[in-house]
Image (cartoon, rainbow, N blue to C red):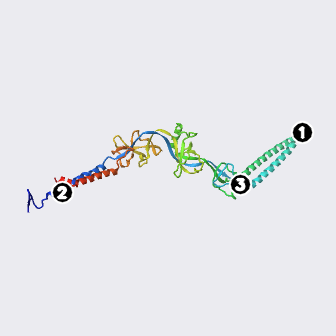
Amino acid sequence: MTRHSGNYAITPGTPSLRTLAAQCAVICAAIGLAGCSDKPQQAASATPEVNVMRVQTTAVPVTVDLPGRVSAHLVAEVQARATGILLKRTFVEGSEVKAGQLLYQIDPAPYVATLDNAKAALAKARATLVAAKAQSDRYKVLVAANAVSKQDYDNAVAATDEAQADVEADAASVETAKINLSYTTVYSPITGRIGKSSVTPGAYVQSSGATELATVQQMDPVYVDLTQSSVDGLKLRRAAADGKITLTGPHAAKVQLVLEDGQPYKGTGHLEFSDVTVDQTTGSVTVRATFDNPHDVLLPGMYVRARIDEGFNEQAVLLPEAAVQHDQKGNPTALVVNAKDQIELRQLTTGGVTDNNWIIEKGLNVGDRVVVSGGMKVQPGQNVHAVDQGATPVSATAAAADAASDSAAASASASSPAAASAGAV
């Protein structure tokens, strides 16, 4: 059935004006939401930002880090030089001893007897010499008066010379006996710290077997023997030859240590020498430094890492450690923004490290823009927006918040009564 309303005829199934207006409002709101949804996609596809720093040169100290071991300045192995029973030990293990301090006493009785025997033999030889000399003197007068033959006089002179030689030999035997007797008292040859005793009182020690009794080490100062590759050693010697660094004297290159627990050693050492022989097995040379060790912090055999100041590089290129990456082969690389604002991958040759910065020897030029942060989200060849280090980039969170705000505002505008009325017109 058809109903008439004013100038319009309404049939069943025909939408009313109110229904059409509502449908138009819904369609407009959907279009508005679709338009707003493009904003986050556009934000997501925007050019990524990276922080960069421009390469410039500066004067920096050139250092090299080397592993090493501590060794004593002087080492004396105390050995038995007399054979016998050890009667006593007169020191405390691990204590400081002075040069000439008594350490051990070996039974001296056999050596005392030997000395007494040598003295008796010497006395006998001297008496024989006196008698021989007296006879020689008498024969000298008698031979002049032809009272004795010349042969008898010559025999008397020879007997005197023989007796004199016996005296000298027996005197040497006495001195030998005295020396051997002195070996029964064992003294410290140097001043230092003595370690564990290898023998105890009552032990039988031998001079022929060179029984080691203990070891005394002088640990102030100490040596630190560092291991350096032959290539780096060659550079070090060339730097010394060029006058860039000094290996000895008051202006010797300074050396700093890091201990096994990661703490720095308070004292500063000096380079002594670089070995002249390359180890054929490891291809390395030994570099020796000297450190004062008044509190015995550095012990012989301790593992340390040393940093050597090799001089100054007046035109050094520095790069933060965070800006240096490594490829699959372990080679250092860096990302650089070129003049077209595109990412380039540069292969680097690095030198030492100073203040958490790599010293770059090759791969960068003055004025290059190196990526220091944001490099994880870009690839070589990609266009980027470079921001000088120190500028504050827009964070991803803030961008997402702005997009959500725009979307919500568009939704509210589309669903408002005014928007519905406008759609109905």
Amino acid residing under circle 3 = Gln
Which of the two residues, 327 or 88, is positioned nearer the viewer here?
Answer: 88
Q: Residue 360: horizontal and vertical position, in percent?
A: 44, 42
Residue 17 lies, with reference to residue 378, above or below; the image says below
Q: Which residue is mark 3?
A: 105
Q: Tell me whether the residue at label 1 lies in contact with that at label 2, contact meaning CB atoms closer than 8 angstroms.
A: no
For this view, does 36 lie left or right of residue 7? right
Residue 371, placed above or below residue 23: above
Residue 92 falls in image quadrant: bottom right
- Residue that numbered label 1 is attached to: 141
In x, y percent, where is residue 411?
A: 25, 54
Hey, what amino acid is under mark 1?
Val
Q: Which mark is residue 22?
A: 2
The residue located at (32%, 50%) in the rendering is: 399
Q: Nearer the viewer, mark 3 or mark 1?
A: 3
Residue 181 numbered mark, or none: none
Residue 273, given in percent of the width and then of the height, sits at 57, 42
Classify mark 3: helix, strand or loop. Answer: strand
Which residue appears at 29% of the width and 51% of the height? 403
Secondary structure at numbered mark 2:
helix
Residue visible at 78% across and 47% down in the picture: 171
